[in-house]
Image: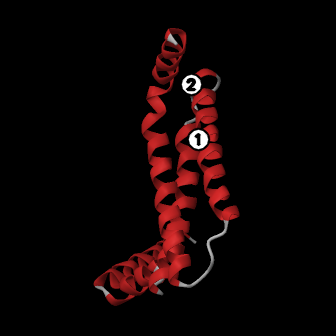
Amino acid sequence: MEKAIKFLFWLLTLLSPVNGVMVTMVFLIVVDFITGSYASLKNSVPIRSSRIGHTISKFFIYNLVILAAFFLEKHIVNEVPFLKIIAGFIAIAEIKSILENYNAIYGINPFKALANLMKLTPLKDAIESLTKEDSKDKDKQQ
């Protein structure tokens, strides 16, 4: 028992720099699971065990990929931020899934809502003026 405790302590010490990233991924997976389950219940779609299994496999696979990226970055190619790149892609995929669940629950697409909000505010004018200035600069260069 004492050897197991020492091994566990050693393992946690080795993985401590990546704990924050792994906890964040677990949090996103849990939020995706909760919103997906709620969307299924609200839309009367049966919850299947295969979908729950998919969530469990995401938990293990995502964390293994994050660990692999961490060790690759730390011990082989430390010039490339593999951990941040891979964790960013995984986080974007999970956030996209959460927003799709939000759309299924409330019938509101957050991406379209943001685009419509940008069209209705003075931000639209600012964006248009920037694009006009960019096109004028390109014309002057030619």
Q: Bin the neighbour count of mark 1 within 10 Å (Cα to Cα): few under 14, some 14-19, many 20 and up.
A: some
Three-letter amino acid code at the position of disc 2: Lys
Res 63 → quadrant: top right
Which residue occupies the extreme left position in the image? 122
Say above or below: 125 vs 27. Answer: below
Three-letter amino acid code at the position of disc 1: Asn
Which is more toward the observer, 27 or 21?
27
Say above or below: 91 vs 41. Answer: above
Instruction: Count how many numbered circles sit on residues in the image.
Output: 2
Say above or below: 3 vs 130. Answer: above
**Which label sits on residue 74?**
2
Q: Bin the neighbour count of mark 2 within 10 Å (Cα to Cα): few under 14, some 14-19, many 20 and up.
A: some
Q: Position of residue 19 (x, y in %)?
A: 45, 34
Mark nearer the viewer, 1 or 2: 1
Res 75 → quadrant: top right
Q: Position of residue 93 (x, y in %)?
A: 58, 60
Which residue occupies the extreme bottom position in the image? 120
Q: Position of residue 42 (x, y in %)?
A: 50, 82
Asked whether the viewer can see residue 140, the reply is no
Res 130 → quadrant: bottom left
Q: Position of residue 45 (x, y in %)?
A: 61, 80
**Which label sits on residue 63?**
1
**Which label sits on residue 142?**
none
The quadrant of the picture occupied by the C terminus is bottom right
Q: Earlier in the sequence, mark 1 or mark 2?
A: 1
Give the secondary structure at mark 2: helix
Which is more toward the observer, 11 or 139?
11
Which residue occupies the extreme front position in the image? 1
Which is more toward the observer, 136 or 77?
77
Residue at 41% in and 79% down: 114
